[in-house]
């Protein structure tokens, strides 16, 4: 059974930093592209950042230069380091696993972790 468990969310002041992580189990982690999405109340879920099996990263324009995604294949964990946080970054952050390469037939989601940025 595949599980993605996010942790590390919380309340932070504008301009501050926060790191969230996602621990994966039940899958061959190194064969999966890992992605962070976020969803604020009343809005659609949006892609924040992704990291492929070979470590290539991609970011949404809104977070480029402020957020960093990384992965540790030895621990089956993906991280999202968030700096210079803004109130508009407030959302539930969800971990997503897409794979396994090269067919990418499976798409798994975590329950999410709340990130709240106060002004």
Image: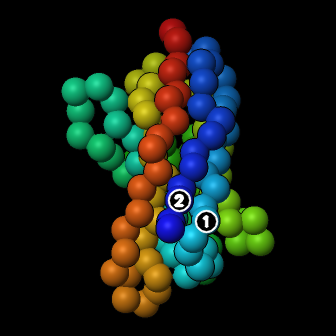
From the viewer's perspective, is 72 left or right of 58? right
Q: Is residue 75 visible?
A: yes
Q: Residue at x 51, y 9 (%)?
A: 119
Image: 107 above or below 9: below
Q: Camera-side residue: 28 or 101?
A: 28
Task: Please tell me which of labels 1 and 2 falls first in the chain.
Answer: 2
- Image coordinates for residue 93, horizontal then vertical, percent: 47, 40
Q: Are the two marked residues, 1 and 2, in contact with CB atoms closer than 8 angstroms? A: yes
Q: Is residue 58 visible?
A: no
- Image coordinates for residue 101, horizontal then vertical, percent: 46, 86
From the viewer's perspective, is 102 left or right of 41? right
Q: Residue at x 60, y 62 (%)?
A: 24
Residue 102 found in image quarter: bottom left
- Image coordinates for residue 91, horizontal then vertical, percent: 42, 30
Image: 51 above or below 89: below
Q: CA distance from mark 1 to mark 2?
A: 5 Å
> Which residue is most to the front?
1
Neighbours of disc 1 within 10 Å: few (<14), some (14-19), many (20+)? some
> Which residue is most to the right?
74
Neighbours of disc 2 within 10 Å: few (<14), some (14-19), many (20+)? some
Image: 18 above or below 60: above
Q: Residue at x 50, y 29 (%)?
A: 114
> Which residue is most to the bottom?
102
Residue position marked by numbered label 2 in the rendering: 3
Q: Which mark is residue 46?
A: none
Q: In terms of secondary structure, where does tag 1 sit?
A: strand
Residue position marked by numbered label 1 in the rendering: 25
Q: Residue at x 42, y 56 (%)?
A: 109
Q: How is the image coloured?
A: rainbow
Number of labels in the image equals: 2
């Amino acid at each position: 059974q595949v599980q993605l468990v996010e942790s590390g969310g919380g309340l932070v002041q504008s301009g501050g930093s926060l790191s969230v992580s996602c621990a994966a189990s039940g899958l061959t982690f190194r064969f999966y592209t890992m992605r962070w999405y976020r969803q604020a109340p009343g809005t659609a879920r949006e892609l924040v950042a992704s990291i492929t099996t070979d470590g290539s990263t991609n970011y949404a324009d809104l977070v480029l230069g402020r957020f960093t995604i990384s992965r540790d294949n030895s621990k089956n964990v993906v991280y999202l380091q968030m700096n210079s946080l803004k109130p508009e970054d407030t959302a539930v952050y969800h971990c997503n696993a897409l794979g396994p390469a090269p067919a990418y037939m499976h798409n798994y989601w975590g329950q999410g972790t709340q990130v709240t940025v106060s002004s």
